[in-house]
Amino acid sequence: MVKDSEIPPAPKRRKEDRSASQHTTGSEHGGAGADEPSSLRPTHSEIRQRLRFIGRMDRFWCWLAFRLPCPLVYWTLIRAGAYASTGPYKHTDPTAMRYMLTLERWARKAS
């Protein structure tokens, strides 16, 4: 996770830059205004705010995971392992399967 001290402070933006960033000009779709200045890009403070939100969500999921009942965690692990060794992965030996491989396959299913 990125610490606040690792992100440089946001540069001061002029008032006209703020108003320009609130309106779209069509440059996202290749229309007029494709040569717009970087005022449409998120500022450092906006990026820092997003990173803080992601960090809070990660802490929440971690907090929740450690408070789940053990039987639920046990069967969740069995379900993920079963998925990672069946279907398109049916030739995988479940006893030799690595933990990270299981997570990788499960993440592909979720996306």
Image (cartoon, rainbow, N blue to C red):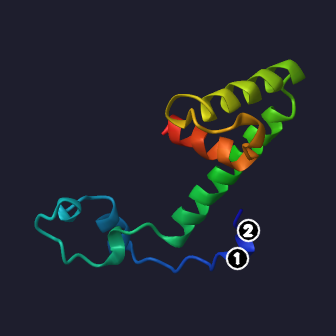
- Residue at (69%, 53%) from the top-left corner? 55
Q: Mark 2 packing: few (<14 Cα in 10 Å), some, or many (20+)?
A: few
- The three-letter amino acid code for the residue at tag 2 is Lys
Q: Mark 1 packing: few (<14 Cα in 10 Å), some, or many (20+)?
A: few
- The three-letter amino acid code for the residue at tag 1 is Glu
Q: Position of residue 70 (x, y in %)?
A: 88, 23
Image check: 58 left or right of 48?
right
Query: Quick check: 27 above or below 71?
Result: below
Name the secondary structure under disc 1. Answer: helix
Image mark for residue 3: 2
Q: Are marks 1 and 2 in contact (CB under 8 Å)?
A: yes
Query: Quick check: 45 above or below 89?
Result: below
Question: Which corner quadrant of the image does residue 92 belong to?
Answer: top right
- Residue at (70%, 49%) from the top-left corner? 100
Question: 42 and 68: which one is in front?
Answer: 68
- Residue at (63%, 51%) from the top-left corner? 53
Question: 31 and 67: which one is in front?
Answer: 67
Q: Position of residue 66 (x, y in %)?
A: 86, 35
Q: Position of residue 76 (x, y in %)?
A: 73, 25
Query: Quick check: 7 above or below 55?
Result: below
Image check: 72 left or right of 45?
right
Question: 60 and 38: which one is in front?
Answer: 60
Which residue bears the numbered disc 1? 6
Question: Which corner quadrant of the image does residue 18 belong to?
Answer: bottom left
Marks 1/2: CA–CA distance: 5 Å
The N terminus, quarter of image? bottom right
Q: Position of residue 64 (x, y in %)?
A: 79, 33
- Residue at (55%, 36%) from the top-left corner? 89
Name the secondary structure under disc 2. Answer: loop
For the image shown, how many numbered marks are present on the structure?
Answer: 2
